[in-house]
Amino acid sequence: MGIAQEVPRGYLGIGDDVAAIPIGGRYAVLKVDMLVGSTDVPRGMNYRQAARKAVAMCVSDFAAKGVRPDSFMVSIGVERGTNQKQVDQLAAGFRDAEEAWGLRMVGGDTNEAKELVVDCVMIGFATRIVERKGARAGDILVVTGPFGCPPAGLKIMMERARAAKAFMAKALDSVRMPTPNLEVGLALSSYLTSSMDSSDGLARCLHVLAEESQIGFDLDRMPVAEGVADFADENGLSLQELVMAGGEEYVIVGTVSQRRLRAAMAAAKAAGGELMASGRATSKKGRVRLLEGKSRKSIGDDGWTHLAS
């Protein structure tokens, strides 16, 4: 399906994590994201968690752009027969999001639907936005956290995968209560040369960032969360697939100039998070490779794609 890509001069181009409209020397920053029950609410997630997740999805994009969101609205579609408890859970989930990220819910709409749908619109204001383009060869590839827990949690919830008790609790919590680190994204906004939200998968991020900046990436290591390798071994799963193509991570993936890496890491730590260096940008346009042993192998553009067959 094609979508027109042309916007007036001064607007952020269509296709980035947010939209930005120039207003009086700064930007009104907007994001819309839709949570759909059948694709975004796995078995074991309640309505309170689903409502909070719908807001978290937008917060994650704001974090990746280095912009503080101000408020949000929601349009909700609920099934006929939805009970009062479920309605109360939705309200509680929105309150959870307000408290977690310092937001205001300022309105919305409710309608009947064949399944739960929560469409969240978020707004903030900024004088600068970190775009998906802007990286240069030699920049350091960075992530704000390790990968693999949410994909493992989904395997546990949807496919009854086996896991040690402690890891199972951590993996399930990462799915039910995604927590993009907004403060870290804000702290990194002046250091990142490019960035995007990783909810569609790390490999997808690398290919998108590479295409936007006309560069490539060489990864020295995969940013693997503790316990994910053991989980993959126990269930006969591909560790690379879990880490690179799993999605639902809500981690910032971006680039920082080599000379500013140490300062960026210190800024992330001061904001209560971390910044991990995983590789570097190269001049090989579109080529994304991972170091394995003494050689590098190509990483495909894998990840979540809507309406894919």
Image (tube, rainbow, N blue to C red):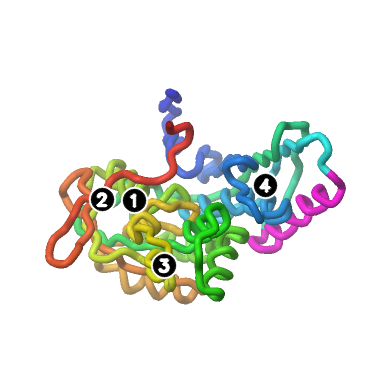
Q: Nearer the viewer, mark 3 or mark 1?
A: 3
Residue 20 vs residue 248, the one in the foreground: 248
The numbered mark, 1 or 2, whose residue comes first in the sequence reads 1
Q: Amino acid at mark 4?
A: Phe
Q: Amino acid at mark 1?
A: Ala
Q: Nearer the viewer, mark 3 or mark 4?
A: 3
Q: Taking 214 as reference, is 194 left or right?
A: right
Rendered image: mark on residue 203 = 1
Gap in angstroms between the C-alphas marked 3 and 4: 42 Å
Classified by dominant secondary structure, the portion drawn in magenta counts as helix
The numbered mark, 3 or 4, whose residue comes first in the sequence reads 4
Residue 244 vs residue 269, the one in the foreground: 244
Q: Secondary structure at mark 4?
A: strand
Gap in angstroms between the C-alphas marked 2 and 3: 24 Å
Task: Answer above or below: position of 132 versus 182.
Answer: above
Determine contact: label 1, label 2, CB under 8 Å.
yes
Gap in angstroms between the C-alphas marked 1 and 4: 30 Å
